[in-house]
Image: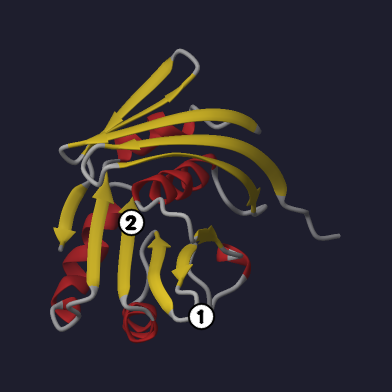
Amino acid sequence: MAQKATIYKIELSVSDMDRHYYETHKLTVAKHPSETDERLMVRILAFALNAQDQLEMTKGLSDDDEPDIWQKSLSGELELWVALGLPSEKVIRQSCGKARQVIIYSYGGRPAEMWWEKTQNSTTRFDNLQVMNFSETDTRELAKLANRSMKLQVNIQDGEVMVSVDDSIVYLTPIKWKT
């Protein structure tokens, strides 16, 4: 029998001083049975870093043709495609062809670095692609904050990120591999 997704209820308050965006989002997020707490929290963080009114979580791991997060225009065109992890060159190429802007958030330490060393030359032709990396230490600390009912506060200033849940705080510095 297939395992079902675990539902997380999240109140996400974003204070992004870099983009002058200040909003609270009430999210219901389905955690796929194969998804780790680390990946779930990186997904929520990616949402916060790109938060806008039309931004949506997608089926993600459940559907290979969708990113983890996207934003569509009112006419249904893909404005933003946000992927997590270490996508193949084929997936990068396809997503850059489908969306106006593509952002990949990689994480996982040395495997992410090896993926980027192998992939970066094939991405130079994509002007609509951004690749950001989170350190393994940062994302492991972030994973410890995971809870099925969370009130997250995400503050972003000068590219630095502070995530807090209750009395726990994690500081992250996304590293820009491609802008």
Q: Position of residue 101 (x, y in %)?
A: 30, 72
Residue under the image location 54 percent in, 32 percent down: 146
Task: Please state which of residues 27 and 19 is positioned toward the viewer in this rendering.
Answer: 19
Q: Quadrant of the N terminus?
A: bottom right
Asked if residue 131 is positioned above or below residue 151 in the image, the reply reads: below
Left or right: residue 35 compared with residue 1: left
Asked if residue 137 is positioned above or below residue 51 in the image, the reply reads: above
For badge 1, the amino acid type reads Gly
Classify 10 Å Cα crowding around label 2: few (below 14), some (14-19), many (20 and above). many
Residue under the image location 31 percent in, 79 percent down: 89
Left or right: residue 4 compared with residue 176: right
Q: Quadrant of the C terminus?
A: bottom left
Viewer-side label of 1, 2? 1
Left or right: residue 157 compared with residue 98: left
Task: Please state which of residues 124 and 56 is positioned toward the viewer in this rendering.
Answer: 56
Q: Position of residue 118 (x, y in %)?
A: 20, 71
For badge 2, the amino acid type reads Tyr
The secondary structure type at the circle numbered 1 is loop
Q: Position of residue 129 (x, y in %)?
A: 24, 72
The secondary structure type at the circle numbered 2 is strand
Residue 124 sits in quarter: bottom left
**Residue beneath label 2, please?**
105
Of labels 1 and 2, earlier in sequence is 1
- Furthest-top residue in view? 167
Q: Position of residue 171 (x, y in %)?
A: 29, 28
- Residue 76 is marked as 1
Residue under the image location 40 percent in, 69 percent down: 81
